[in-house]
Image (cartoon, rainbow, N blue to C red):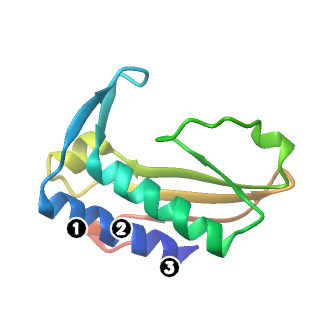
Amino acid sequence: MIDLAEQAGIAAQKARKSGLEISADEDMKGYVTSGDMDVDNLIHTEAAVRFPNAVVLSEETQANFEPRNYPEVLIVDPIDGTRLYKDGDKIWSINLCMVKNGEVISAAIRQPDLGIT
């Protein structure tokens, strides 16, 4: 889980360095950046390999399932603090949490710009 959070952090930093596309998220009344979506896509791809029995519940993508109906759920906030992230601040994070049968079994919070997991 930690290595996935670290990998996602590198992807987010790379996306920001390359220049972000920013759009308003009407439902959340905030922002969604191309970095958010890059990280979300990476985590979905990696989760399919690393956690094949889990469904992914992410802030950035619509869930067309009821999480409580699945024994394993990976809960994801691809970039927590999008406004700070897009503005170049260092205080933002990648948040991952694996829940199995309703119980947290693993979690990771990565703050890439601070080098903290």
The numbered mark at residue 96 is none
Which badge, 3 or 2, comes first in the chain's sequence? 3
Which badge, 1 or 3, comes first in the chain's sequence? 3
Return the residue at label 1.
14
What separation in Å lies between label 1 and label 3 (alpha carbons)? 17 Å
In this view, the residue in front, 19 or 110, is 19
**Tag 3: amino acid:** Asp
Disc 1, SS: helix
Residue sitting at x 32%, y 28%: 30
Q: Quadrant of the C terminus?
A: bottom left
Q: Residue 1: x percent and y percent?
A: 58, 73
Which badge, 1 or 2, comes first in the chain's sequence? 2
Residue sitting at x 29%, y 53%: 35
Q: Relative to residue 82, is residue 27 drawn left or right?
A: right
Return the residue at label 3.
3
Q: Relative to residue 32, is residue 48 drawn left or right?
A: right
What separation in Å lies between label 3 and label 2 (alpha carbons)? 10 Å
